């Protein structure tokens, strides 16, 4: 992975290494700001938590994840949501707007004209100002043709639990497919020192692939490779095992959106896998795993200057990037890694239920064909919120939803998560509700604890990121419609 490969970012040449992701190559080059929030155009960067910070245009293809494009040849990548150009972006003036002015989004504002023609023009203007890509891009060449795969057992996730389940199913004489986000299944578990069992060679591995939908109570599972030139996959499994593990939820403090704030997964992918320096001074916070994560980062060459409980974190400092953290004292740093609280993304399990209102229940609600195992099946960690919520902390930076906006709605008497989602657009961006709805629920629970006990969870609907329009078109004829 040391062979040099040059690419272009916003029209300027950048040196990278073959095999590393564009996100890692940009970070190595000192470029951390790669996107901006939807309404106020505040800076975002790759974080592992907020998907919008990783979206850019790559070779004319909009909304491409920089952490899922791996350098093999020169490419041209461009920051989106800028005008007239990334180098001279007048839209950054929106950072001067008071947060309250854009509560709910411009489309919910009092400035919207009432006349139908004027409203249409207004909507087009808003789509331009808040857009994150050119929808006129047309793929050249043939459509990536999908595949339909019948398998006895489908395992989603390649950590300890996923590998163990796959090996056990193969030992019983069953055909097994394993889908993993990583090039090597279980890379995060390996990075934190877990003892991974070797995968039985009879397990069919689909790496760098994401399951984006579970339909018909687990009877049909759809996935897409990161490479948009490869066709999507439709599995028809007899049984599906979700071993997705858990992710760290960002701290709900001021500055949590800044470039330089990353979760433990992304930090280890940069430092341990890609050999990229996280920064000159790194702070690690967490809910018990922070010391182990800090040790791993130090072994990978990171200069960790402080390790603390995330409950002690008061704020993250910086205007355009991280410059410090306030714990029991102010600490200068240019990277903050959070390792907890840990929560599993419930989206796929939610989809598998496919009945009633679709509200969350136990994995048995999906029937015997879908099960959740490993860390994803454990009780979620409680989110440690500061004693006093900071109105400027982001709940959903993709859609520019702050704590202040949520509290504003709560003061108006609204505490239902589904209604709050619609009023604020929280979780309706590329994150598709995770981790934003976890943070939204935590704010409601703290500000209105009695109401929060009866609040249902918003619905997670397929597709869950991953698939391109071309890949979806390539599935034509492979799935019979419900009648």
Image (spheres, grey):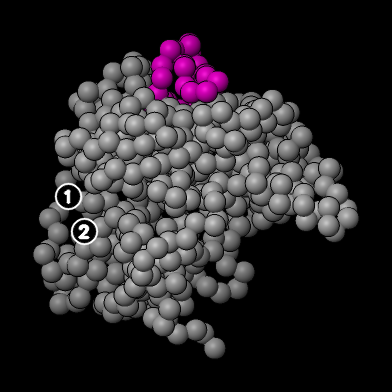
User: Magenta span has 124?
Assistant: no
**Region of the chain picked out in magenta, as a range:** 309-337
Asked if one can make out residue 428 in the rendered structure from this viewpoint, the answer is yes
Dot 1: few (<14), some (14–19), or many (≥20) neighbours within 10 Å? some
* Residue in view at x 54 percent, y 64 percent: 461
Q: Could you tell which of marks 1 and 2 lies nearer the N-terminus?
A: 2
Residue identifier under label 2 = 163
Q: Position of residue 429 (x, y in %)?
A: 57, 50
State which quarter of the image contains the C terminus: bottom right
Residue 267 left/right relative to 45: left
Corner quadrant of residue 263: top left
Q: Position of residue 339 (x, y in %)?
A: 38, 34
Residue 242 left/right relative to 462: left
Task: Say if 239 sits above or below 316 in the image.
Answer: below
In this view, the residue in front, 92 or 308, is: 92
Residue identifier under label 1 = 196
Residue 262 left/right relative to 317: left
* Residue in view at x 58 percent, y 61 percent: 459
How far apart are the two marked residues, 1 and 2, measured between alpha carbons?
8 Å
State which quarter of the image contains the N terminus: top left
Q: Are marks 1 and 2 in contact (CB under 8 Å)?
A: yes
Q: How many marks?
A: 2
In this view, the residue in front, 123 or 351, is: 123
């Amino acid at each position: 992975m040391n062979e040099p490969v040059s690419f272009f970012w916003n029209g300027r040449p950048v040196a990278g290494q073959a095999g590393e992701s564009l996100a890692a190559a940009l970070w190595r080059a000192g470029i951390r700001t790669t996107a901006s929030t939807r309404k106020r155009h505040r800076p975002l960067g790759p974080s592992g938590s907020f998907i919008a910070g990783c979206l850019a245009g790559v070779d004319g293809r909009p909304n491409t994840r920089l952490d899922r494009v791996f350098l093999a040849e020169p490419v041209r990548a461009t920051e989106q949501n800028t005008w007239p150009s990334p180098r001279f972006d007048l839209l950054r003036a929106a950072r001067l707007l008071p947060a309250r002015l854009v509560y709910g989004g411009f489309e919910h504002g009092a400035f919207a004209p009432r006349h139908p023609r004027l409203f249409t023009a207004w909507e087009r203007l808003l789509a331009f100002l808040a857009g994150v890509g050119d929808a006129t891009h047309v793929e050249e060449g043939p459509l990536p043709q999908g595949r339909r795969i019948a398998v006895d057992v489908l395992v989603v996730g390649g950590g300890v639990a996923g590998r163990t389940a796959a090996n056990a199913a193969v030992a019983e004489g069953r055909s097994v497919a394993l889908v993993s986000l990583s090039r090597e299944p279980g890379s995060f578990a390996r990075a934190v020192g877990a003892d991974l069992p070797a995968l039985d060679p009879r397990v069919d591995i689909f790496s760098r692939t994401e399951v984006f939908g579970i339909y018909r109570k687990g009877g049909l599972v759809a996935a897409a490779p990161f490479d948009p030139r490869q066709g999507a996959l439709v599995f028809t499994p007899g049984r599906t095992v979700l071993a997705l593990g858990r992710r760290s939820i960002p701290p709900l403090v001021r500055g949590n959106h800044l470039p330089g704030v990353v979760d433990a997964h992304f930090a280890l992918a940069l430092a341990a896998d890609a050999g990229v320096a996280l920064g000159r001074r790194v702070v690690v916070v967490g809910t018990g795993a922070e010391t182990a994560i800090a040790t791993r980062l130090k072994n990978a060459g990171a200069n960790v200057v402080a390790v603390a409980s995330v409950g002690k974190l008061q704020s993250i400092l910086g205007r355009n990037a991280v410059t410090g953290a306030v714990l029991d004292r102010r600490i200068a740093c240019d990277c903050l890694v959070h390792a907890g609280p840990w929560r599993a993304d419930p989206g796929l399990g939610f989809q598998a239920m496919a009945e009633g209102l679709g509200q969350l229940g136990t994995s048995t609600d999906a029937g015997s064909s879908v099960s959740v195992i490993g860390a994803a099946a454990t009780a979620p960690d409680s989110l440690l919120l500061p004693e006093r919520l900071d109105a400027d902390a982001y709940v959903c930076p993709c859609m520019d939803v702050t704590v202040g906006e949520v509290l504003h709605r709560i003061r108006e008497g609204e505490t239902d998560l589904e209604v709050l989602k619609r009023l604020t657009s929280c979780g309706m961006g590329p994150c598709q509700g995770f981790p934003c709805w976890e943070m939204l629920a935590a704010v409601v629970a703290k500000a209105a604890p009695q109401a929060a006990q009866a609040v249902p969870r918003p619905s997670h609907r397929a597709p869950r990121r991953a698939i391109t329009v071309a890949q979806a078109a390539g599935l034509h004829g492979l799935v019979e419609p419900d009648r």
